[in-house]
Image (cartoon, rainbow, N blue to C red):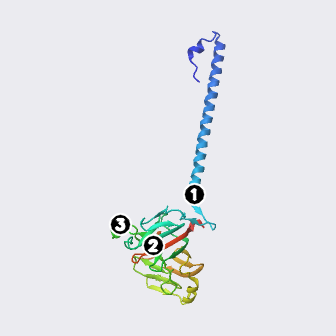
Amino acid sequence: MLIQSDWLLSVPEDRGQSHAFAQFFTFSNDLEISFMVRVFCWLVCLSLMSFVVASQAVAEDSVKLDSDGMMVIFNGKDLTGWDGDPRLWSVRDGVIHGETTAEKAAKGNTFLIWEGGNLQDFELRLSFRCTASNNSGIQYRSMRVPAGKRGGGNEWVVKGYQHEIRNEDTFPNVPGFIYDEKGKRGRICLVGETATWNADGKQVADERLIDAAAFKDLMKVDDWNDVKIIAKGNRIQHFLNGKKILDFTDEHPQMALNEGILALQLHAGKPMWTEFKDVRIRLDDDK
């Protein structure tokens, strides 16, 4: 509140009384300013609290944890957080659905790439099913091939470790082995093997984790199967329906992969479909 000086001067001529009036109005002015400052600060605090609450709500909605504390990276509604050929990848009935047809063929092996960044040590869990006409895969510790090296107009090309996905139960063409996608080593480690690969080549332990007969009982052809992949340091373990089926240690000085992206594969060639659900991950620093 501004008090004009000429008004104050019009107050009775008693100088002491004039001084008292001036002090009173100055005090009132200070009170009003103090009140306005407090109101402003309160409004700022309220706005900040609202922002924090809204941010937490967005974070909780975008990053959900399952009952085991694992991060859910597919929301069951759309492909938010994933990048792939929109002609071939979609969400159907709450699951990731990839499909090629004669009319919509894959231009080489193509991938649905998780946009969550590079993975080092992790535990991945998901469920899959697919047709028997072709195969699919789960890429991890992989890299996206640069544009100049892809060819064929396919933007979603990946190389690196692949967990093979198949709708078969007869050795050796079964789901779960490690394949070197676009690499030099082919089928790096087969289902049932405990193996190490170093500069001198591959060594396989005599003891088998699972044999052909036991795998037939384990694998659910034409149905959903549960996968777990654990990668820690240079050791990789694959599990199918709760059973460890592969244990691999990569000690190769040039070809071992310590980090990279996660992706899901649609294979080129014969028309096919593949589906994934309940995709969850735990990073090593989350434990």
Residue in front for this viewpoint, 122 or 55: 55
Quote the CA–CA distance across marks 1 and 3. Answer: 33 Å
Residue 249, percent from left and from top: 51, 80
- SS state under label 3: helix
Mark 1 and mark 3 lie on one chain; the one further toward the N terminus is: 1
Find disc 3 in the rendering and name its residue.
Answer: 147
Above or below, 203 against 182 in this view is: below
Q: Is residue 2 left or right of residue 156?
A: right
Above or below, 34 against 273 in this view is: above
Residue in front for this viewpoint, 242 or 178: 242
Find disc 1 in the rendering and name its residue.
Answer: 61
Residue in front for this viewpoint, 61 or 232: 61
The residue type indicated by label 3 comes to Ala
Residue at 52% in and 71% down: 276
Q: Residue furthest top?
A: 13
| Residue contact between numbered discs 1 and 3, judged by CB atoms under 8 Å | no
Quote the CA–CA distance across marks 2 and 1. Answer: 27 Å
Find disc 2 in the rendering and name its residue.
Answer: 265
Tell me the quarter of the picture where residue 208 sits: bottom right
The residue type indicated by label 1 comes to Asp
Mark 2 and mark 1 lie on one chain; the one further toward the N terminus is: 1
Residue 74, percent from left and from top: 53, 65
The residue type indicated by label 2 comes to Gln
Residue 269, percent from left and from top: 39, 77
From the image, which quarter does the N terminus lie in? top right
